[in-house]
Image (cartoon, rainbow, N blue to C red):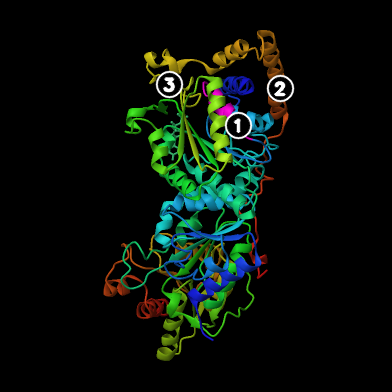
C-alpha cells in the first residue's frame, strides 16, 4: 500500500512535468481494497488480473515495481517494451495477465486460465482474481464472464471497487439495482460487502472470499464501498464529485486508517511505519531512476510483426 | 469411403484431441448434442472433460480461450454461426490479436466460424467474417475450400502459436464430399492453383472456389477459354507470390468472394496486384462480390445476392473482352 501510494504520487509528478506521455491512472484511496486482494494471493500459484487502480494489488501480489516504472516511462527493457504503456502491463506466463483497456474483458480471461488448470489437473488450491469498478460491472463482458465462471464453478474472486463514479458518471446513472451485490446473487455467486476505506475490514473480507474460492465454493464477488481520491486520470480534476461526498465517510483516506489500525492493534508503532515509508521511498526512487536511464524503444530495430509464426513453415505436425 | 467437409472437421478435432492433451473444445451445444452442425459428434463421449458446452456468451468464450492459451492449452472454440462472433469481436481483435505484439507471449487458440450463406439462412446466419478479422493485426485467417484442406488446415491451425480464425463454409458441410482426406502437403500460408489456365486468373477462396471452377469449365466449353483458378486457402496472410505468378501467366485478374463488396479480401487482392504487379496486367483487374445488402432469406434472392457461375461468367467475359 505504502509503495503504491508513493510510487503513484511520483508518477503523477512526472506526468505533470511532461516526463510521462499518455496518462497516469491512480488508485489513490483504493489501496486497501487492492492490496488486501493481492496480499491474499500467492505469486507462482495464484492468478491476478489487475485493472486500472491496482498498483496496491500488483505490489502485494509480487509484480516487481520496476515493471511499473519501465512501462510508464516507455523503457525498451520493460515487459511491454514501449508497445503498451502505463497500467496495460503484466507477466502473462506468471499468472499476471496484461489488461486490455476494454472493461470487463479480464473476467473471462482469468476464468480461462483457471479452466485450463482444471483440465490439466492443476487447479487444486488455486485462486484467480480480478478487479473492476462500479462502471465496469455494466459491461456485457462482465456479465458473460461472471456467469460463465459461475457455471464452471471456478475459484474466481472478483473485487468490485464501488467508488461511486465511473469517470464522471454517478452510480444512479450506472445501475438501477439497490446494491451491486444483487448481481452476485443473480449469478449464483457468493457476495461480500466491505467498507473499502477500512483496511482491516478489507483484509478480513478478501481473506474470506479468497478462502471460500479456494475451498471450491465457486466464484466470489466482493463489493468495496469507497471513493477514488483522485481524478479518473491525472488529466481529470474530478470536480464532478460533490463536496458532500468528498467529506463523507467514503472520502476517508484508507492509508491514514491503515496506519492508525496498525498502531492501535499494536502491530507497528509510528517509528516503524515511518521507517517503512523511508524504505519504500528509496525503492521507488531506484526503480524510477533505473527506468529513466534505460533506452527508449528504437523504431528502426522494432520487429513490426504482430504474429509469432511464419506460416509457410507450418505443415502437418 | 466418402468423407464430407464437416466430417473432415470432426475427424481433425478427433485427431487433435487424441494426439494433443493441450487441446480442448469449447462452444454452444457441442458436447453431447454434437454441435449445431454435428462437427463435434461423439467427441464429448470419447474425451470426457475436454469438450465443454459454453453459455451463450461469445465474448466470454473467447476470453476463456485466451486465458487457457496463456496457460499452455490449445483451445478450439466453436462459434455456432460466424455471425455471432460479432459479440466476441472485442476479445478476438483486442485481446487475442494484440497479445503477442504487446507482451511477446503468443496465444495459440483456434476459432471455428461456420461461415457463408446457404438458402433460407437469412441475414444473421449467412455472413462471411474473414475480412473483418483479417483487417486486424495479429490474427491468422484461413478459409479451407476442400475436404482435405478442412482436415489438414484445422490441424495446422491448432499447431500455430497465434490465434487462428478458421472459416469453414456451411454450404460445403454436407454438399462437398471427397474419397478421403489425403492432402497435398501445402503449408498453411500457401495458396493453391486449383485449376490451371492461361487466359485469365480468378483469385478466390472458400465455397467460391467451386463456383469459380464451374464458371471456368463453362468458359472452356463455350469459348475454349482457359481460366486459372487460385484458391487462396489462407486470406491473412495472403500468398502474393502465387497470386502474382498466376497473373504473370494470364495478364488478367478477377478477385472473387462471397463477402460484402466494400473493402475486404477481394479489394486487398486487387489493390496488391495493382501496386505490386501493375506491369503484369493486360486489363484492369476486376472484383466480384456479393451485393451490398444484408444476405437475404429467400432462396431466389439469396442466389441473386451472391456470385454464381452465370454471373461469374459475365464478369469473366467482360474481363476477357477488354
Ligand atoms: C468497454 C469500455 N468502455 C469505455 C472505456 C473508457 N473508460 C475507461 S475507465 C472508465 C470509467 C470506469 O469506471 P469504473 O468501472 O467505475 O472504474 P473507476 O474508473 O471508477 O475505477 C471508462 C468509461 C473502457 N475502458 N472500456
Left or right: A14, with A223 as reference point: right
- Does the residue at mark 3 contact the one at mark 2 (Cβ under 8 Å)? no
* Span highlighted in magenta in the image: A24-41
What residue is rendered at 70% in x and 21% in y? A285
Residue B37 image position (x, y, % from top left) = 43, 70
| Element type where label 1 sits in the image | helix
Q: Nearer the viewer, mark 1 or mark 3?
A: 1
Residue B203 image position (x, y, % from top left) = 49, 72
**Image height of A185 relative to B133, above or below:** above
**How many dots with numbers?**
3
Quadrant of the rendered image holding ligand 1: top left
Q: Nearer the viewer, residue A167 or B221?
A: A167
The residue that mark 3 highlights is A238
Q: Earlier in the sequence, mark 1 or mark 3?
A: 1
Label 1 – label 2 distance at C-alpha: 19 Å
Q: Earlier in the sequence, mark 3 or mark 2?
A: 3
**The magenta stretch spans residue A292:** no
Label 3 – label 2 distance at C-alpha: 30 Å
The residue that mark 2 highlights is A283
Q: Nearer the viewer, mark 3 or mark 2?
A: 2
What residue is rendered at 42% in x and 32% in y? A134
User: From this viewpoint, is residue A73 visible?
Assistant: no
Amino acid at each position: 500500500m505504502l509503495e503504491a501510494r508513493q510510487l503513484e504520487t511520483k508518477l503523477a509528478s512526472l506526468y505533470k512535468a511532461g516526463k510521462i506521455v499518455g496518462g497516469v491512472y491512480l488508485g489513490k484511496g483504493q489501496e486497501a481494497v487492492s492490496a488486501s486482494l493481492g496480499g491474499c494471493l500467492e505469486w507462482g500459484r495464484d492468478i491476478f488480473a489487475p485493472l486500472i487502480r491496482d498498483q496496491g494489488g500488483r505490489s502485494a501480489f509480487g509484480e516487481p515495481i520496476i515493471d511499473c516504472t519501465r512501462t510508464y516511462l516507455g523503457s525498451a527493457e520493460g515487459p511491454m517494451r514501449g508497445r503498451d504503456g502505463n497500467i496495460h502491463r503484466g507477466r502473462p506466463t506468471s499468472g499476471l495477465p496484461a489488461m486490455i483497456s476494454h472493461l470487463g474483458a479480464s473476467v473471462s480471461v482469468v476464468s480461462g486460465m483457471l479452466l485450463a488448470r482444471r483440465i490439466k489437473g492443476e487447479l487444486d488450491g488455486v485462486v484467480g482474481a480480478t478487479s473492476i469498478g462500479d462502471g465496469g460491472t455494466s459491461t456485457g463482458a462482465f456479465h458473460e464472464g461472471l456467469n460463465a465462471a459461475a457455471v464452471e464453478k471456478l475459484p474466481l474472486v472478483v473485487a468490485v471497487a464501488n467508488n461511486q463514479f465511473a469517470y464522471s458518471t454517478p452510480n444512479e446513472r450506472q445501475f438501477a439495482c439497490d446494491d451491486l451485490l444483487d448481481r452476485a446473487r443473480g449469478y449464483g455467486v457468493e457476495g461480500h460487502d466491505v467498507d473499502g476505506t477500512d483496511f482491516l475490514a478489507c483484509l478480513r473480507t478478501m481473506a474470506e472470499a479468497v478462502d471460500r474460492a479456494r475451498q471450491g465454493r465457486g466464484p466470489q464477488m466482493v463489493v468495496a464501498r469507497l471513493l477514488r481520491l483522485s481524478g479518473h486520470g491525472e488529466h481529470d480534476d474530478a470536480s464532478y464529485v460533490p463536496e458532500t461526498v468528498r467529506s463523507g465517510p467514503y472520502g476517508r483516506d484508507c492509508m491514514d486508517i491503515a496506519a492508525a489500525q496498525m498502531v492501535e492493534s499494536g502491530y507497528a508503532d509510528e517509528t516503524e511505519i515511518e521507517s517503512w515509508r523511508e524504505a519504500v521511498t528509496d525503492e521507488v526512487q531506484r526503480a524510477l531512476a533505473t527506468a529513466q536511464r534505460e533506452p527508449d524503444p528504437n523504431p528502426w530495430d522494432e520487429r513490426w510483426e504482430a504474429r509469432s509464426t511464419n506460416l509457410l513453415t507450418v505443415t502437418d505436425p | 469411403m466418402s468423407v464430407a467437409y464437416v466430417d473432415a472437421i470432426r475427424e481433425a478435432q478427433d485427431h487433435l484431441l487424441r494426439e494433443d492433451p493441450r487441446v480442448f473444445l469449447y462452444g454452444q451445444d457441442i458436447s453431447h448434442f454434437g454441435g449445431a452442425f454435428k462437427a463435434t459428434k461423439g467427441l464429448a463421449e470419447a474425451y470426457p472433460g475436454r469438450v465443454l458446452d459454453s453459455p451463450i456468451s461469445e465474448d466470454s468464450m473467447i476470453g476463456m480461450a485466451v486465458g487457457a492459451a496463456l496457460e499452455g492449452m490449445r483451445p478450439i472454440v466453436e462459434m455456432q454461426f460466424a455471425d455471432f462472433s460479432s459479440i466476441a469481436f472485442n476479445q478476438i481483435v483486442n485481446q487475442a490479436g494484440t497479445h503477442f505484439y504487446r507482451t511477446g507471449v503468443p496465444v495459440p487458440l483456434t476459432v471455428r466460424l461456420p461461415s457463408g450463406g446457404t438458402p433460407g439462412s437469412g441475414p444473421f446466419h449467412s455472413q462471411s467474417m474473414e475480412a473483418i478479422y483479417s483487417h486486424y493485426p495479429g490474427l491468422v485467417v484461413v478459409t479451407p475450400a476442400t475436404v482435405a484442406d478442412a482436415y489438414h488446415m484445422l490441424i495446422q491451425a491448432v499447431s500455430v502459436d497465434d490465434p487462428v480464425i478458421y472459416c469453414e463454409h456451411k454450404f460445403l458441410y454436407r454438399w462437398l464430399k471427397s474419397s478421403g482426406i489425403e492432402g497435398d502437403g501445402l503449408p498453411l500460408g500457401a495458396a493453391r492453383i486449383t485449376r490451371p489456365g492461361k487466359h485469365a486468373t480468378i483469385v478466390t477462396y472458400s465455397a467460391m472456389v467451386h463456383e469459380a471452377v464451374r464458371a471456368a469449365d463453362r468458359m472452356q466449353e463455350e469459348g475454349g477459354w482457359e481460366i486459372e483458378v487460385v484458391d487462396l486457402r489462407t486470406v491473412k496472410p495472403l500468398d502474393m507470390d502465387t497470386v502474382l505468378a498466376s497473373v504473370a501467366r494470364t495478364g488478367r485478374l478477377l478477385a472473387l468472394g462471397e463477402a460484402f463488396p466494400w473493402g475486404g479480401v477481394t479489394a486487398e487482392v486487387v489493390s496488391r496486384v495493382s501496386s505490386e504487379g501493375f506491369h503484369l496486367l493486360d486489363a484492369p483487374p476486376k472484383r466480384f462480390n456479393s451485393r451490398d445488402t444484408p444476405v437475404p432469406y429467400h432462396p431466389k434472392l439469396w442466389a441473386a445476392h451472391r456470385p454464381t457461375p452465370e454471373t461469374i461468367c459475365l464478369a469473366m467475359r467482360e474481363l476477357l473482352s477488354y
